[in-house]
């Protein structure tokens, strides 16, 4: 009996679906006035779509931030350099002329599971320079830093070893002896010993180095970039993160202890100049590294950026903080005032078929979706609100967050590689539109990081992913807003 009931229910739903697909109006199906309650699937609701430039943002808002050089043949070229502070240690080194510097190593831990580009045949010639201006916290990613010409560190990377299995073995001084230990995946770049010998010389006025501000104004900071003149291929974007006691500069040098006779000797001094600082009072971690991004777009992308009120068949989404897609529902008002109870609403967007180009041809594993209020301020849609109010989540997905710590999966946005699409669940959002609780019927799509447990509604720098979407006229290419609803009679 139970199986017969399920079969009957499946048959009824199938009939509704087939009936919905024949609707030519693009705004839903008429309901027989004689029926008290009728379930309807609207799968032809028209949406208009265009690519827009995303807003800039600050790297300090994220636990990891983008770096790299990516010449995407579809979207264009993105260059993401990295500016970082040289932090003042608790004991500032004063290096004498007779000192011997053994090593100066810049250490940058990789971000979590984020790389987009060529994974097989790509090398990256890295360069490190000193900033001409003192590093300042909170800079936007559009800031172009003033940098010295002299290169003080180089390294050619055959691939970014960013995966968790790519742990490294490094020499650490533990219990008065050097030991080879396993550490998290990280980039290590040797820097000029002569440069740091002069930078931290004992001839530098001690008053200059005695305060955080004085030290920062003296050392300025570092700038990591890729030598574009030596690049070939398409490159790629990776992320780096601030990790307390890891992100920064490891400095080891030897110098005399300044004593004479039997007491004379050589001291080995190991110093760590931190780029990430933890406030001892609040426990807050401050990551003092910032992406600096430049872009050049292809003609197809630029055409949409110059026509923000247009409607296009190919759509471009790009991180970090690059491109987003705006979707409008122009005929949603035709469903208002009809006592509609939305049982389910889902947005389905399809991937563009791109020419085969090797391992670089990877679409974003995750997208996010959000809206703007009447003041133009970004807001999450109700179904994807992962903000907190004290210890409680205020969005529809809050209960699943406590169970899995990944409530965005219930909201949607994860790539379906087999069906080449993304699906979002927007039931509360569409219901609020019909009830007039939300007045704007446009919303936005953009890439999001897999490692981000929240549902971002702001520009992101913690991923370098991109996606090319379709909005054609045929099945499997047209963006669809499917609404399952019940029309309640007065």
Image (spheres, helix red, strand yellow):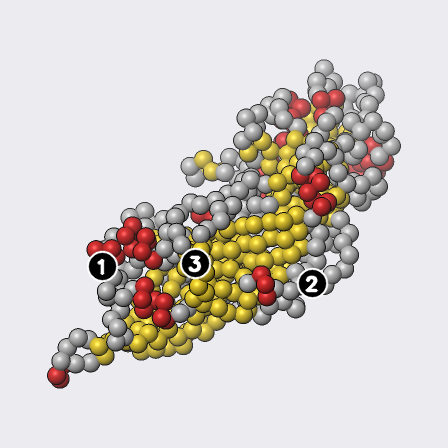
Q: Which residue is mark 1?
A: 205
Q: Residue drawn at (62%, 43%), measured in percent from left and top?
A: 323
> Front-most of 130 and 273?
130
User: To which residue does mark 2 refer?
Assistant: 359
In the picture, measured across the screen, residue 67 lies left or right of residue 285, that is right
Q: CA distance from mark 2 to mark 3?
A: 36 Å
Q: Is residue 400 visible?
A: no
| Residue at the extreme front | 149
Q: Nearer the viewer, residue 367 or 2?
A: 367
Which numbered disc, 2 or 1, marks the residue that appears first in the sequence?
1
Q: Identify the residue shown where x is 68% and y is 60%.
A: 360
Does 214 sit above or below residue 14?
Answer: below
Sequence-wise, the earlier of marks 2 and 3 is: 3
The percent position of residue 448, horizontal first and vertical second, equals 59, 47
- Neighbor class of circle 3 (other Cα within 10 Å; few <14, some 14-19, many 20+) is some
- Tag 2, which secondary structure? loop
């Amino acid at each position: 009996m139970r199986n017969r009931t399920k079969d009957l229910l499946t048959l009824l739903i199938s009939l509704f679906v087939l009936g919905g697909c024949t609707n030519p109006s693009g705004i839903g199906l008429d309901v027989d006035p004689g029926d008290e309650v009728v379930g309807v699937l609207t799968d032809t609701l028209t949406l208009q779509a265009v690519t827009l430039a995303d807003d800039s943002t600050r790297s300090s808002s994220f636990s990891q931030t983008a770096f790299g050089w990516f010449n995407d043949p579809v979207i264009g070229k993105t260059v993401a350099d990295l500016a970082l502070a040289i932090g003042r240690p608790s004991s500032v080194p004063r290096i004498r002329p007779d000192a011997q510097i053994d090593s100066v190593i810049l250490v940058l831990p990789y971000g979590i599971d984020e790389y987009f580009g060529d994974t097989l045949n790509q090398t990256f010639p890295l360069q490190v320079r000193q900033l001409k201006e003192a590093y300042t916290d909170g800079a936007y990613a559009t800031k172009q830093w003033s940098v010295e010409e002299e290169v003080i560190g180089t390294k050619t990377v055959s691939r970014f070893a960013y995966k968790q299995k790519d742990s490294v073995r490094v020499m650490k001084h533990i219990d008065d002896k050097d030991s080879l230990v396993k550490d998290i995946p990280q980039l290590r770049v040797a820097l000029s010993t002569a440069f740091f010998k002069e930078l931290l010389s004992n001839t530098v006025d001690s008053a200059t180095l005695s305060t955080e501000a004085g030290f920062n104004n003296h050392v300025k900071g570092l700038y990591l970039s890729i030598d574009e003149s030596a690049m070939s291929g398409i490159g790629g974007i990776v992320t780096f993160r601030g990790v307390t006691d890891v992100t920064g500069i490891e400095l080891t040098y030897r110098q005399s202890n300044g004593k004479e006779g039997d007491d004379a000797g050589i001291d080995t001094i190991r110093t760590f100049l931190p780029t990430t600082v933890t406030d001892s009072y609040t426990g807050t971690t401050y990551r003092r590294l910032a992406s600096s991004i430049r872009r050049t777009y292809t003609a197809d992308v630029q055409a949409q950026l110059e026509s923000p009120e247009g409607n296009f068949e190919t759509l471009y989404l790009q991180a970090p903080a690059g491109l987003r897609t705006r979707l409008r529902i122009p005929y949603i008002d035709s469903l208002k005032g009809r006592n509609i109870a939305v049982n389910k609403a889902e947005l389905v967007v399809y991937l563009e078929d791109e020419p085969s180009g090797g391992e670089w041809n990877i679409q974003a594993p995750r997208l996010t979706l959000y809206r703007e209020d009447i003041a133009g301020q970004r807001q999450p849609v109700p179904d994807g609100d992962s903000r907190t109010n004290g210890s409680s989540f205020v969005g529809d997905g809050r209960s699943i967050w406590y169970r899995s710590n990944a409530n965005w999966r219930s909201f949607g946005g994860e790539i379906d590689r087999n069906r080449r699409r993304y699906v979002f669940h927007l039931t509360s959002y569409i219901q609020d539109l019909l009830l007039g609780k939300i007045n704007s019927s446009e919303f936005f799509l953009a890439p999001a990081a897999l490692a981000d447990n929240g549902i971002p509604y702001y520009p992101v720098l913690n991923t370098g992913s991109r996606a090319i979407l379709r909005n054609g006229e045929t099945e499997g290419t047209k963006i669809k807003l499917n609404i399952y609803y019940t029309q309640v009679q007065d």
